[in-house]
Image (cartoon, rainbow, N blue to C red):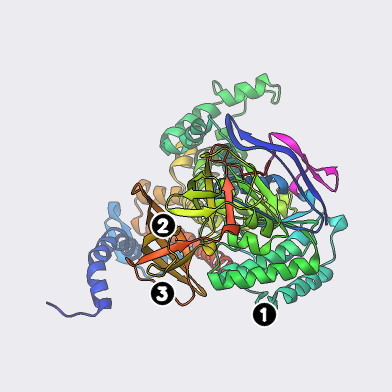
Amino acid sequence: MAEVRIELIEKRIGQKTILPPLTLTVHDGEFFVLVGPSGCGKSTLLSLLAGLDQPTAGRILFDGVDVTDLEPRERDVALVFQSYALYPHMTVRENMAFPLTVVPRAKRLDRKRIEEEVERVAGFLGLSALLDRRPRELSGGQRQRVALGRALIRKPRLFLLDEPLSNLDAQLRASMRAELLRLHKELKVTTIYVTHDQTEAMTLGDRLVVLNQGRVQQIGRPHDIYAAPANLFVAGFMGYPPMNLLSARLGADSIRAGPLDLTRPPGMPPVDQAQSVTVGLRPEDLVVRPANGPGDEGNGLGVVRLTEPSGPTLWVTVELNDLNNEAFTIIGTAQAGFVPKIGERVAVSAPRTTLHLFDPTTEQRWGAG
Amino acid sequence: MIRLSERAWGYVFAGPAFVLVSLIALAPIAAALWLSLRQQLPIFGIDEFVGLGNYLQLWGDDRFWAACRTTLYFTTLSVSAELLLGFGFALLLNHLSDGAGKGLRWAHVMIILPWAIPTVVSAQIWAWLYQPDYGLLNYLLVVAGLTEGAIDWLADPDWAIHAAVVMDVWKTTPFAALLLLAGLKTVPQELYAAARVDGAGAWEQFRRITLPMLMPVVVIVLVFRTMDAVRVFDAVFVLTGGGPGNSTETLSIYAYKTLFQTLQFGYGSALATAMFVLAALLSMLYLALLRRHVQGSA
């Protein structure tokens, strides 16, 4: 159990910057998620935290103690790798016991105690029947659990997970997510979880940080980030299908985004007329209806290009044309009971409360300071 | 269209290879076996079937048992030294190639060089190094004050076999090193990262990960090197010719002398067969070890 403070940590290899200076605090006992696209530096950050890699500059503190120069073994952290990195020549039992058997002899538990610990953790993870198998005889989900068991057996004060679910199929992934949350609830170990999957980030994290090219884009609780993305990157990255981002022009009390006429949200700071903004609209906030009803004024009219049924919702990709015949492609939700066909003419409307406004030059959220 | 089962077609296609292997490998072995059951001395015009007579004679032949001992001594010493040194060099090269080692290509060339030189040539080079009057080895030892006077390495019955071992180790350690290096390269780096996070130090990482993961390669190195060492001929023959006395006479040198210097074709063939059996026994032993290991980790 530990609070983790990362202070201006930086990693360069030669002239190449892998991770620009980054500062971050993870609270004690928190489930913290690092999310970002491939190459955003999240795995590098994890290696630095584990002590597998040395930062070029900056400090890492666990509970206020500087651990920057400590070897991994001195940090008391556990790391679950994306590929699990199980020892192929050892049985499940030996794999899980490994961290306990490499402890210096003076502090090592006796053989019987180690065996008991393995049995206990195996029982906890539902691995009791598999203890004498080797990794290659296990399924992906079982390997995953062995990797977790090997990490948990030592009761580390920091638990690092590097995309641990990305090699599993969708169903298993969902159940392992639940499993991870249960584990975290019971063990209350500070957990830092790296993923590129924003769904995973949203469902798992107490808090999460969105990284892009090594830079912090936004830190916060999943819902806050979803409700108020700090900039265009976060807006486009978090949420599926991604937020529609349209360049728009401000009118007196309306916002014109191509063919869509949107009402200005109340409390919006006064800005110059005709100033351009970027409007963000979540697909779930855009309603796609048949195009023949009355009151179509102010709505965009367009043609269906693609439909994606996804359980309760049906995502519709619509190509809209504005007055200048410029094409906009946006994704919306089909009105309940409406199943549009590709090529069908539809109307798209947006309730005003759900607008996100961004400054197109700074790419920051409007009025976010 | 001829209708044959898949299996039969397999034999048909493998046929030419079978024939080739039979002609090149099996036929000479069979011929030697046949020859070993005869007494054949062309200079006296003797050529008769003696059954196991040659083998019975072999059993009572002290020179044969001495050659066996010399061969096994040479094999044990040189193979274990080659394996240990080869492991050391492999680890060193692997370590160098993990960093941005500029000298790596050179290191590879340097390490492979002894192996690329024909044995006869390198044995001759070593013969000069060992030479008592002008040899570099004696010169260095005397200059360093380690020995009083020159030692005639190859003429001393105790030193001679060790001189041959040193030469063989120098020459074939690269082979072991390269095979082991290839093995080291196949161990995923992530396992070491995992072990470091799990708290393993350098020694534990070597003992618990590197060594067990490399066991199959180690056994392969042992099999190859043992086979070669059991049959060693040119290295020892060029250095000592089997002398002084018969102190460095290995099985193959004894067989060579019997076959081509005294022209006892039957008895020489029996010696060659004995050598073949020894090599086969040793390789079966190793393969049993390997199989047990593979089963253990499968």
Question: Is B54 part of what is drawn in magenta?
Answer: no
Question: Who comes first in sequence, dot 3 or dot 1?
Answer: 1
| Residue lying at 75% horizontally and 59% vertically, measured from the top left | A99
**Image position, residue A90 (x, y; %):** 64, 65
| Front one among A201 and A13 | A201
Q: Amino acid at mark 3?
A: Val
Q: Nearer the viewer, mark 2 or mark 3?
A: 3
Q: Which mark is residue B272?
A: 2
Quote the CA–CA distance across marks 3 and 1: 49 Å
Range shown magenta: A53-72
Answer yes or no: is residue B191 visible: yes
Quote the CA–CA distance across marks 1 and 2: 55 Å
Quarter of the image with the N terminus of chain B is bottom left
> Does dot 3 land on a helix, a strand or a loop?
loop
Q: Which mark is residue A339?
A: 3
- Circle 3: is it few (<14), some (14-19), or many (20+) Cα within 10 Å? some
